[in-house]
Amino acid sequence: MKFKKMTDEHIQLDVEKINGYLSAIETMNIADNIGVEYAFINLPQKLTLLQSIENNVANIYPGTIIANWHISLEEVNEHQLVDSLNTWFFCFGKAVTLKNELPALCAGFMDLLKQLVYTPAIYRVTMIPPVWYATDWETFAFDTDNGFFLLEFNFDT
């Protein structure tokens, strides 16, 4: 099977589809005094994936000193990503009780993701953000033939 790069419009539609899926999962994770946020974004193209991530952070938090975030990348495999998905998808609220009833939720998400991030290199983004960032988070970056992408999970109490 030969890969053909997607158009920008098709990429944007797939990003929106993935975010819709994540929004539904956020809803299942609603709990008292916990704000859950899951997002998938198409990163601006820079020379490297790390530069794209740093640029994204700088755009979201103007005036921040990127060096203070100590952003780095650790390559992970698909199995490690799926393990994290299982943790974040069934973290809080009603989702905790639905874990055994919805085992295909992660597989469905991976199917959506694979349509866009065809044969990606997957990285866990490690960073030390400012204390106001979130209570807990996990971020993955994808280096694909369709561009650079970021998958973020976080919650705040």
Image (tube, rainbow, N blue to C red):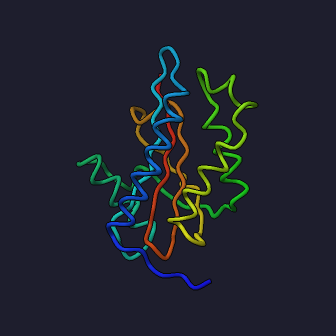
Which part of the image, by quadrant, shows the N terminus? bottom right
Taking the spot 68% from the left edge, 41% from the top edge, the residue there is 86
Q: Residue furthest right?
A: 100
Give the answer, above or below, for where 140 lies relative to 122: above
Q: Position of residue 33 (x, y in %)?
A: 47, 16
Left or right: 137, with 100 as reference point: left
| Residue 77 percent coordinates (x, y) | 69, 62
Q: Tell me if residue 82 comes above or below residue 26 in the rendering.
A: below
- Dividing the picture into quadrants, the one containing residue 113 is bottom right
* Extreme residue toward the bottom, this view: 2
Numbered-mark total: 0
Q: Quadrant of residue 95?
A: top right
76 sits left or right of 123 in the view: right
Q: Position of residue 155 (x, y in %)?
A: 49, 31
Q: Residue at x 53, y 18 (%)?
A: 31
- Quick check: 62 left or right of 123? left
Compared to 6, does 29 lie above or below? Answer: above
Residue at the location (36% across, 74% down)?
7
Q: Is residue 150 left or right of residue 78?
A: left
The residue sitting at 43% across, 71% down in the picture is 147
Q: Position of residue 76 (x, y in %)?
A: 66, 61
**In the image shown, does 50 or 144 lie closer to the viewer?**
144
Q: Nearer the viewer, residue 126 or 103?
A: 103
